[in-house]
Amino acid sequence: PSIANGASAAPEAQSLIERGLKSSFWQLRLPNGLEQRYLRDAIEARVLHTQHAGWFALLVFNSFLLVDWLMVRDVFWISVLIRVGLFTPAGALTLLAGRRLATLSRDKGWVNTADWMSVISGWMATLSLAVILLLSHSPWAPYYHAGFLVIIIYGNLVQQLRFSFALLFSGVVLAVHLAGMLVAHDFPSGVRTGTMLMLCVATAFTLVANYLMEKATRRRYLLACRDAQLVEELSALNARLQTLSRSDVLTGVANRRHLQGQLDLAFERARTDGSPLSLLMLDVDHFKAYNDTYGHPAGDECLRQVAMALQANLRHPSDLVARFGGEEFVIVMPQADESAAVGAAERIREAIESLGMRHEGSTISPVVTTSVGTATLTQGSEITSADKLVSCADRALYEAKHAGRNRVHRYQATRA
């Protein structure tokens, strides 16, 4: 299970988990919101466990008809009516609705559904046995009070009631047993004392076992939460590292290594399906003079602004912006013919010029400008590799700069 939403919640969630793991032996409740989360996470599994254990318990409950025949034969048919005619149909209907009840409990957030199902079924079994013993005049009836122990074992160990419910459940069963002994006038005193002592000690043992099981279950939940938290943090860190390995540290766009891999894939795809592939190479005009005039921190900020403008003016989400090196950027444009590439390049050039970043060191404009070269792979093109496509775009960029900068030039085969 995950207990944190977002990176900001992770330290607090981790702290709560550690507090829960370090809590004293006598503390069952988990700290703060972990308790309710634990109960909600366990709803469906607990209801289904109650359902599965309930079928076994129903079989055991009816198998005690044999004991009824041997020890309280005078009320045997009443036992049949109570066990088979009343308790079994009610229990079976409840168990048949178990999966639907589990879903409903999960959707409604009924965290105590499973425990109340077990408690009520156990109390019904207790009442059934009490009625049978109250109506019987068999001399063996006092010894049959040991049957209450089976019911306590069912609730505390088989159904694994939460400890608070186990205390309530066991207390009521013992109270019914005690009341039955007091009502029965022919109850031998030795049997009365021995039976009561046996039930009390057995109840104490089952409650200790119940507490240890719940404590262990809650600890396993916390350990699972901690593992899930760790996996979540490692996944986030891995995603971050993956992003960093593909991104240029300064500008945040793709780095040259990632560009090479993506360009190779795009080139092979274009060659296979015959679709066009364009590449734009862009250079910030007189960038060395910009650094000399304003300093390297300002130069870095200029490159970041240029990169943001490139990202904001892409033609399609599949286009890739990458820093090629220094003040040079490359844009890979799958499915873009020469006309689309030149149009995108002109739009990008105008967008960067419109940023209005002062450039007193430039000989062509008072603001930062760019020169752009484009090259396009088409069917029958002389461009035979991704590196050749880059080389052609670089040649077009050189021509744009040679022609006076702050302009777009496209590569033409006749100039090669």
Image (cartoon, helix red, strand yellow):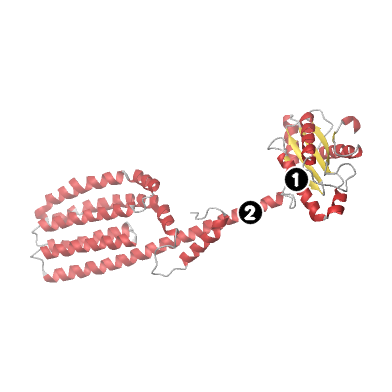
Percent across and percent down for residue 20 are 46, 64
Query: Which label was assigned to residue 238?
Result: 2
Quadrant including the C terminus: top right
Q: Is residue 166 visible?
A: yes
Q: Quadrant of residue 173?
A: bottom left
Residue at 15% over, 51% down:
79
Q: How many marks?
A: 2
Q: Is residue 343 above or below residue 47?
A: above
Q: Is residue 389 above or below residue 44?
A: above
Q: Amino acid at mark 1?
A: Ala
Percent across and percent down for residue 165 are 31, 59
Residues at circles 1 and 2 in contact by the CB criterion of under 8 Å: no
Position of residue 8 in the picture relative to residue 116 (left or right): right
Query: Which label was assigned to residue 408?
Result: none
Residue at 21% over, 70% down:
197
Query: Which label was assigned to residue 307?
Result: 1
Mark 1 crowdedness (10 Å alpha carbons): few <14, some 14-19, many ≥20: many
Query: Closer to the camera, 305 or 380?
Result: 305
Identify the element where label 2 is drawn: helix
Identify the element where label 1 is drawn: helix
Mark 2 crowdedness (10 Å alpha carbons): few <14, some 14-19, many ≥20: few
Percent across and percent down for residue 242 are 67, 51
